[in-house]
Image (cartoon, rainbow, N blue to C red):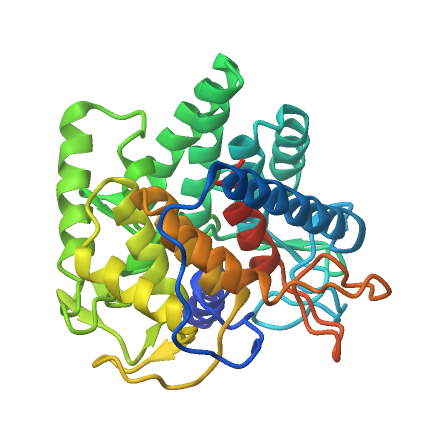
Amino acid sequence: MTSKRSAATLLVLSLLLASCSGKEAATGPAATAGETVTASPSPSAVTSRSMDHRKKRQELSTFIAKQLTGPYGVYTNLLETDQSGEAATGHEVLSESASLLMSAAALAGDKEQFAGQWALAQQTFDMEGGFSYRYSPKQQKRYPVNAAVDDLRLIGALYEAGEVFDEPAYTEQADKYGQRFYDNNVKEGYMYDFYDNVYKTTNNFVTLCYIDLGILRKLSISSELSGILMHNMDGILEEGYLSDTFPFYETRFDYHTGAYSSDHINTVESLLSILHLTETGQQKPASIRYIKEQVAAGTLYGQYSRDGKPLNDIRSTAIYALAAMIGAEAGDDSLYQAAIARMNEFQIRDADSPLSGGFGNTDTGQAYSFDNLMALLAYSYSL
């Protein structure tokens, strides 16, 4: 039993890496400094920009549908593998991808795509205790743990669809799955990263980028239980703020030790935390300023030390997509447009390339689901 639990722990660590790290990111064009964004564009410029976003979104959507999608969902990577690694690879599929596609479809008002993606997600990932974070077609294996961040995004997409499409059935399903999430991923008023469907247990910490406050607030639980949960998780997220000098967030909080831990800061994780705060109007002004400055300079890198020193010079599609979403949620159009412009630098424009319209590496042929779906979601904010 102990060895099996250890194996499960290793699995969970790979889950954390797959769900909100920037490891999929590919190095992009060299950074350039000193660029600015016009504060008040003319109406014609706004219309032209919107049409350009729609065109690029459609090209990306076509790439995802034709090249990056199989019978079970969006491939983790366009390049196939034997699907036997600890982390998802190749044509394995993730509930993360399903949740991002559903969110993008709801934002875009695409009722047909949403219905199709939700039906496929249920078929591929739904378990007794949650949505499996990963399915391997080659191994015919549905992994028995969920990822709280992805379950919450699926639930949130259902709530959004219920409202946008005026479909009460989606809201009812969101309530049902929200109750299941609370029953399994929340203990004594605290949320945990995963629930193991075999051992009926959770881990002992929470990763801060998993704390989606807006969706937690919607869970179909009593006002008393909701108040306790929101107080606890809001506190953990907000108190994970590093400093006004480097306004990012800690990585995780350990319930056993009562302490935060971050060997280094992954930008994707901190941006997700900032996005979740911004969605509920709780963002730190310093965070928005810092992101704007780095986007303008083209120097928003993939990983930092805890005091804000870059540990690499990797820039990625997903990083700028998240910066754009933060701008949209903060009502800062200049940040949104600047981040989208940076993100567009990564889109493959070669019509003869199999990656045309997508985001990936033309030299290696690699294209990752997280980068492409985050870009699709970012474009969807402008529709």
Q: Position of residue 172 (x, y in %)?
A: 45, 18
Which residue is pictured at 83% across the width and 61% down the height?
351
Report whether residue 129 is seen: no
Residue 362 relative to residue 309: left or right:
right
Q: Examine the rendered structure and indicate whether residue 268 appears above or below residue 312.
A: above
Residue 289 relative to residue 171: left or right:
left
Residue 161 relative to residue 299: left or right:
right
Which residue is pictured at 48% across the width and 23% down the height?
173
Q: Position of residue 247 (x, y in %)?
A: 21, 67
Q: Quadrant of the N terminus?
A: bottom left
Q: Quadrant of the C terminus?
A: top right
Residue placed most toward the observer, 192 or 260: 260
Q: Position of residue 365 (x, y in %)?
A: 76, 73
Which residue is pictured at 56% across the width and 59% down the height?
370
Residue placed most toward the observer, 13 or 161: 161
Report whether residue 359 is seen: yes
